[in-house]
Structures are given as C-alpha cells and as structure tokens.
Amino acid sequence: ARCLTIAVAQTGPIQRSATRAETVGRLVHLLEQAAAAGAEIAVFPEMALTTFFPRWRIDDQAEIDAFFESAMPGPETQRLYDAAARLKVGFALGYCEIAQEDGRTRHFNTMDLVGPDGRFIGRYRKMHVPGSAEPEEGTTTHLERRYFEPGNLGFPVFDYGGVRVGMAICNDRRWPETYRMLCLNGAEVVLLGYNTPLLLDEAPALAHLRMFHNHLPMQAGAYQNTLWVAAAAKAGLEDGQALIGGSCIIAPTGEMAAQAISLGDEVIVHRADLDLIAICRKVNFDFALYRRPDQYRLISEP
Ligand code: CDT
C-alpha cells in the first residue's frame, strides 16, 4: 500500500511570557518524538510560535509585530528546520507572517510546509479569518480581523515525496469549501492547525458542543472529499483562556484514526493508507462522474 506516516504535534499553552527559544525547543522535542514513532511528516498548531494574541486588543504596532515572523526560517526558528533535516521529518507550522508585498507591509495567519530536508516547500495563508476588528459587547474578544488580512494564495496543494498535501488553518476547518477546493486541487492529505476557545460568551447554549463542532466538520470534510485530515490543536489554559484540545487524525472514511488524550504537548501518529482514498471514491465519490458543477454556480457567487 502507498502510505504516509503522519504525526500530529499538539502543543499545550504557549504563554506570552515564553521566549521564542523556549517555544521552538518544545517544537523540536515534539518533532523528535514524531521521528522516534516513525513519522514522515508532522503538523504543528496554528500560531505555534506564540500565544493566541487576538484575544487582546493591542494598539501599538511594534507590540503587535513582536508576535510575527518577517523571515522563515529566522534566527530563532532555524533550529526547527535543522531538526527536520537531521531527523528527516518535514513539518507544517502555523505562525504569524509579516510580508512586504504590493509595496506595503501585510500581515497573514500562515502555515508553511517544510520538507524532510529542512527546505521550504510551500505556503498557505488562512482564508476564513473569524472574529472582528474591534471588541464587541457580549462576545468573547477575538480580534483576528484586526490583525490579519484574509489569505491570497488560494488553496494550494504541494508534492511531499509523491504525496499531495494541502493545508488549512483553524476556522477554515468549519467550511466545506476548504476541503472541496483542496480536493479539487488534488490533495490526498490536509494538515491543519487550530486555536479554539473552549467558551464563547455569545453562545453559552452551545458550550457542550465545542468538541463535537470541532470534529464534525473535519470528519465530514475528510469523508465527503476522500481525504486524510490531520489536525493539531494548541490546547489548555493559555494566558487565562481555555483552548480545546482534541487533536486528531481522520481517515477518508470519516473515522477517527488517532486522537490526543491530553491538553498538553502530545504527539499522535498514524500510518495513513493512501489507497483508502481510491476505495472511498469508488463507493460514492467518483467526482468526475457524478459531480454537477454547472448546478453549483451559486456557491461561487458573492
Ligand atoms: N483561531 C480560530 O480561527 N478560532 C476560531 C474561533 C472563532 S471564535 C470567534 C475557530 O473557528 O475555532
């Protein structure tokens, strides 16, 4: 069988007081655990180098930019790339990106795919940027729209040693379009990272559904698009806010193949059988034969 052994490297909280060096050290340790378990690739959470700062309203641009990376790898992250090359395990890493593009400084919520030689393969910028630009009465403060532009790189799929790999970031996982676009672009594996608050002030009646609504769209996305989905949470009590865990690896059948059991740094590994994709397609999802794109045009209209 064609297989890819995938590791999901969940992290526990990354407090604002943590230095980048400490945090990168934790990620290197997780990558070492992934390698020891036979993984060929690992996925880290969204914003894996910092605390989830959009929970705060910050005005000072220098203070904001301190959460961002202007070069990848940079002096503090180089160690992780060196570890990938040493261990021969590539990774997908979520981080905050400052780019000089179109003659201006731009901020994106980004995930990079890095090969088992420690070299950059490809980049994804989060499409579905949730929350607001200003705090809103009665809602949990979530100011991603203050700090990030929506992604402008489409839903790219990259070759990782012969396996077609796409990426998605947090809120993207709740949208069926994310998986369908990646599927149509040829993805076999989707690597995903997230930071999801356990409690939302705006919806106390949904509090008991937070984990269900985490797994439901990812399992549906995997099944309906015949993809493997590997999702890494940043979990636990981070700077006073509880983040859900529930990191997992989901098969194209929609089944949970592996699931984290903690809210801390934890590696889960599964040998993903890529031949399962063709089997699942045969059962119900021969896209070329059965899809009706001419009937779906409304979906791509604003
Ligand atoms: N990081 C991220 O996208 N979190 C969102 C929470 C949105 S609450 C306004 C999520 O979908 O998990």
Image (tube, rainbow, N blue to C red):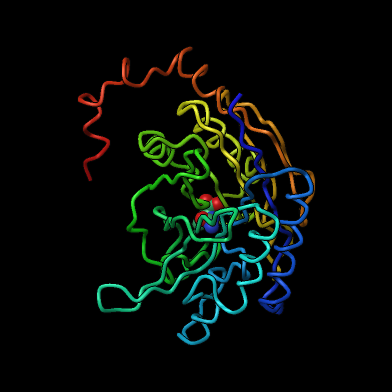
Above or below, comparing residue 98 to residue 231 in the picture:
below
Residue at point 60%, 53% (across, down): 116
Residue at point 36%, 34% (across, down): 184
Residue at point 62%, 55% (across, down): 44
Relative image position of residue 99 (x, y in whole percent): 38, 73
Q: Is residue 110 left or right of residue 252?
A: left
Q: Nearer the viewer, residue 4 or 191?
A: 4
Relative image position of residue 143 (x, y in whole percent): 48, 67
> Which quarter of the figure is the C terminus placed in?
top left
Residue at point 73%, 74% (across, down): 22
Q: Which residue is farthest top?
A: 283
Above or below, comparing residue 187 to residue 192 in the picture:
above
Q: Is residue 165 left or right of residue 7?
A: left
Relative image position of residue 103 (x, y in whole percent): 25, 78
- Numbered label tally: 0
Relative image position of residue 292 (x, y in whole percent): 26, 21
Q: Nearer the viewer, residue 192 or 33?
A: 33
Q: Quadrant of residue 91?
A: bottom right
> Which quarter of the figure is the N terminus placed in?
top right
